[in-house]
Image (cartoon, rainbow, N blue to C red):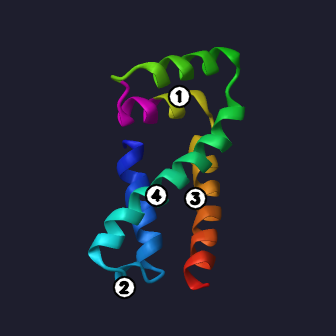
Amino acid sequence: MPEQNFLEEYVLKILQENGFENLSDENRKLMLPQFVAQAEKRIGAALLPLLDEEKAKKFTELAQDEKTTPEIWWNFWNENIPNFTEVVKKELDSYAEEVKKALVA
């Protein structure tokens, strides 16, 4: 499963559960990519320290290659982080709690 679609759907679900639908279409279109980008940063920050030197080099190569697709990233993380799903779930759960607090405030 490509990461981007999953991540966007997950973030959208969190937002919808917390009143996101009350915003105008224009504001939703502006804000959703920002929330997804923040989730991506958090996941990356959690995953990068788990890479050894060789895997970090491969990460750098993929990051510099314009042809790297979300599916390639998804496969890279799954192949190189044994507990990839658990790390992502933990970060997304934490992110969801922060989003809920921010939207309620």
**Callout in the foreground (1, 2):** 2
At a point 55% along the width and 17% down the height, the residue shown is 58
Q: Secondary structure at mark 2?
A: helix
To which residue does mark 1 refer?
79
To which residue does mark 4 refer?
34
Q: Secondary structure at mark 3?
A: helix
To which residue does mark 3 refer?
92
User: Is 72 colored magenta in this rendering?
Assistant: yes
Q: Residue furthest left?
A: 25
**Callout in the foreground (3, 1):** 3
- Mark 1 Cα-neighbour bin, 10 Å: few <14, some 14–19, many ≥20: few
- Mark 3 Cα-neighbour bin, 10 Å: few <14, some 14–19, many ≥20: many
Q: Quadrant of the C terminus?
A: bottom right
**Callout in the foreground (3, 4):** 4
To which residue does mark 2 refer?
22
- Marks 3 and 4 close (CB-CB < 8 Å): no
The amino acid on which the numbered mark 1 sits, given as a three-letter code, is Glu
Question: x, y percentage for residue 3?
Answer: 42, 44
31 sits left or right of 40 in the view: left
At a point 35% along the width and 72% down the height, the residue shown is 27
In the rendered structure, which disc, 1 or 2, sits on the residue that comes first in sequence? Answer: 2
- Marks 1 and 2 close (CB-CB < 8 Å): no
In the rendered structure, which disc, 2 or 4, sits on the residue that comes first in sequence? Answer: 2
The amino acid on which the numbered mark 4 sits, given as a three-letter code, is Gln
In the rendered structure, which disc, 3 or 1, sits on the residue that comes first in sequence? Answer: 1
Depth check, front residue: 71 or 78: 71
- Marks 3 and 1 close (CB-CB < 8 Å): no
Residue 9: numbered disc: none
